[in-house]
Amino acid sequence: MLAVGSSDEDEAGPRNCRFENQPRKLYVFEKPVPEEEPPSSTPKAERDAYKKHVDDANETTCLMLATMNSELQKQHENMAAFNMIEHLKMLYQEQARHERFEVSKAFFKES
């Protein structure tokens, strides 16, 4: 298990994050965690699914923050994983599209 937040971590890094070897949790990028916890009268399976989504989203958020440079960490430190990935798409999707276009253009010029 990797624990983020050790004393040798730089001051800008995320705190109190723990990561365990678990299956991928890509679903946390596809839909946000519901804003309200299901009431206690909700079936246990549904409450458990909500708790798992919250836990997976928190773990994914910490992992994402741990892999960012300090500037990106500061911009995203108060965002959940779903919101973070949407914001990163907004920031970098146009740049990536332009880079793909330039690579394609160069490739077809050489052909």
Image: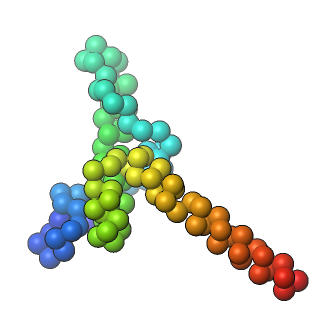
Residue 34 placement (x, y as % from top left)? 37, 31
Which corner quadrant holds the N terminus?
bottom left
Protein image colouring? rainbow
Please tell me whether residue 106 is drawn above or below residue 99 in the rendered image.
below
How many numbered marks are there?
Answer: 0
2 horizontally vs 88: left or right: left
Can the viewer see residue 22?
A: yes
Residue 105 position (above or below residue 46): below
**Residue drawn 59% across the image and 61% down it:** 94
Quadrant for the C terminus in the image: bottom right
Question: Which of the 4 image quarters holds residue 99?
Answer: bottom right
The image shows residue 59 at horizontal and vertical percentages of 31, 52
In-image side of 4 versus 53 (left or right): left
- Residue at 28 percent across and 13 percent down: it is 41
Residue 38, by quadrant, is top left
Taking the view exactly as shown, the residue that stands out farthest to the left is 7
List the single residue furthest toward the top. Answer: 41
Q: Residue at x 42, y 46 (%)?
A: 82
The answer to which quarter of the image holds residue 36 is top left
Is any part of residue 21 visible from this angle? no
Q: Nearer the viewer, residue 36 or 25?
A: 36
Instruction: Give how far across and how far down residue 5 sits, in percent.
Output: 17, 65
Viewer-side residue, 5 vs 92: 92
Q: Give the answer, above or below, for where 43 lies relative to 20.
A: above
Q: Which residue is at 77% across, 81% downward?
A: 106
Q: Residue furthest right?
A: 111
Give the image location of residue 10, x and y in percent. 19, 74
